Amino acid sequence: MLMRKCIYLMIGLLGIITAFVLVAPELFYHLHHVMDIPPFGVICLRLYTLHFIFRGINAVLRLYFGNRGDVTYNSMVTVAGYATLPLFAFILSRVDAPMFYGAYFITECLLLIVNILHYRTVIKKDLEKRSPEEDILYLTVTPQDAIEASRSVREYAEAHGYTQRIAYRAA
């Protein structure tokens, strides 16, 4: 639930920034004191900006996988993303010079597809491993009660035989 809210927030904020740059790229240049916009500058900025939302979602998913201890997967996806970016950039630069910036968008889209597929696989495995007598606890608290709720979850986990590391992670 928290991850979904984080992704929605990421989409909202980065969507606003992306829309701002797509609608008024000249204003974006002027905010950065660039008064003489280079040729193809507007189209390059617009192409580059398209990847912001996908990059943000990928960042949240990588944090999720990292918290689960799936560091190997995170490393492989990061290396694959950085390795394929120059390849796509080279191919697109052969089509048209400003299209070079579309490589960021293509790379992030492919990484998002891979991350979503992995996320679905992980969730499916978790559900299969769960025994029928296990309960899932969903907890909603007000911001004022969050610290006490976190402390209670940690104490409960430690009292029921979980390691301190897992207890803190659960809290």
Image: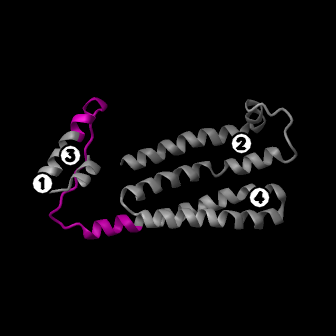
Answer above or below: position of 2 versus 144: below
Q: Label 1 is placed on what type of residue?
A: His
Between residue 48 and residue 165, name the one nearer to us.
165
Badges 2 and 3: C-beta atoms under 8 Å apart? Answer: no
State the CA–CA distance, disc 4 to disc 3. 49 Å
Q: Which residue is mark 2?
A: 22
Specify which label sits upstream in the sequence, 1 or 3. 3
Q: Which residue is mark 3?
A: 154
Q: Label 3 is placed on what type of residue?
A: Arg
Badges 2 and 4: C-beta atoms under 8 Å apart? Answer: no
Determine whether the residue tagged by mark 2 lies in a helix, strand or loop: helix
Q: Which residue is mark 1?
A: 160
State the CA–CA distance, disc 2 to disc 3. 46 Å
Mark 1 neighbour density, 10 Å: few (under 14) some (14–19) many (20 or more): few
Badges 4 and 1: C-beta atoms under 8 Å apart? Answer: no
Q: Label 4 is placed on what type of residue?
A: Phe
Specify which label sits upstream in the sequence, 1 or 2. 2
Q: Which residue is mark 4?
A: 100
Q: Position of residue 143 (x, y in %)?
A: 31, 32
